[in-house]
Image (tube, helix red, strand yellow):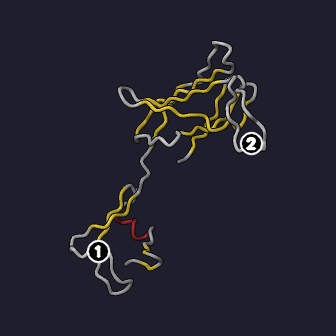
Amino acid sequence: QGRITVVLDNVPPISYNNNRAASHGPVLPQSSVTIEFSQTGGQTYYGSVYRVIYSEATQSMIEISMGGQMIEPGTYQTLITVQPSTQSSQVYQPSVFPMTFENTDRKLVCVDQSGTGCTGPDTGGSSFQVTVTLLPLTAESASELLKWEFGGISAS
């Protein structure tokens, strides 16, 4: 699971733990940051601030974590809300911007048309077909750009 790094302009400083010994700089309780990814008429997902990288007079950089949620591929409107002090009702929404999540779950799957399965000796075995999904190549360029190996043995 990855993280998303975002720079927020025109927001006041966010209170965070900037102790260099800490593994990350979490938002402190006196500030609040909410992150929402939503599609019109669709699903809404919420992220959380994994760490504040820096926060200065009018700009902050944060890392967003989805907490293990699997977001469906698509384009979402992203809304980040910053409340520098939870003691105040003043809230900043620097902007709403689109963010596209793509499915990068590439798969190599055996197509067993012969009934013999996809196992065999490392040399002299029967051939078998595989399908590869979500690998954006044309048929002409695949053999030139990719080298297929199974356990260190080149496929032909």
Q: For residue 107, which quarter of the picture? A: bottom left
Does residue 21 appear to the left or right of 136 in the view shown?
Answer: right
Question: Is 56 drawn above or below residue 51 in the view shown?
Answer: above
The residue tagged 1 is 128
Which label lies toward us, 1 or 2?
Answer: 2
Which residue is outermost to the right?
A: 20
Q: Secondary structure at mark 1?
A: loop
The residue sitting at 70% across, 28% down in the picture is: 28
Asked whether 148 or 142 is in front, the reply is 148
Residue count near mark 1 (Cα–Cα under 10 Å), binned few <14, some 14–19, many ≥20: some
The residue sitting at 70% across, 37% down in the picture is: 25
Which residue is outermost to the front?
A: 29
Q: For residue 126, which quarter of the picture? A: bottom left
Return the disc, 1 or 2, that comes first in the chain's sequence. Answer: 2
The x and y percentages for residue 137 are 39, 59
The x and y percentages for residue 30 are 70, 22
The residue tagged 2 is 22
Q: CA distance from mark 1 to mark 2?
A: 52 Å
The x and y percentages for residue 80 are 56, 27
Which residue is outermost to the top?
A: 89
Q: For residue 42, which quarter of the picture? A: top left
Question: Is 147 drawn above or below residue 134 in the view shown?
Answer: below
Which residue is outermost to the bottom?
A: 124
The x and y percentages for residue 156 are 37, 78
The residue sitting at 78% across, 44% down in the picture is: 21
Residue count near mark 2 (Cα–Cα under 10 Å), binned few <14, some 14–19, many ≥20: few
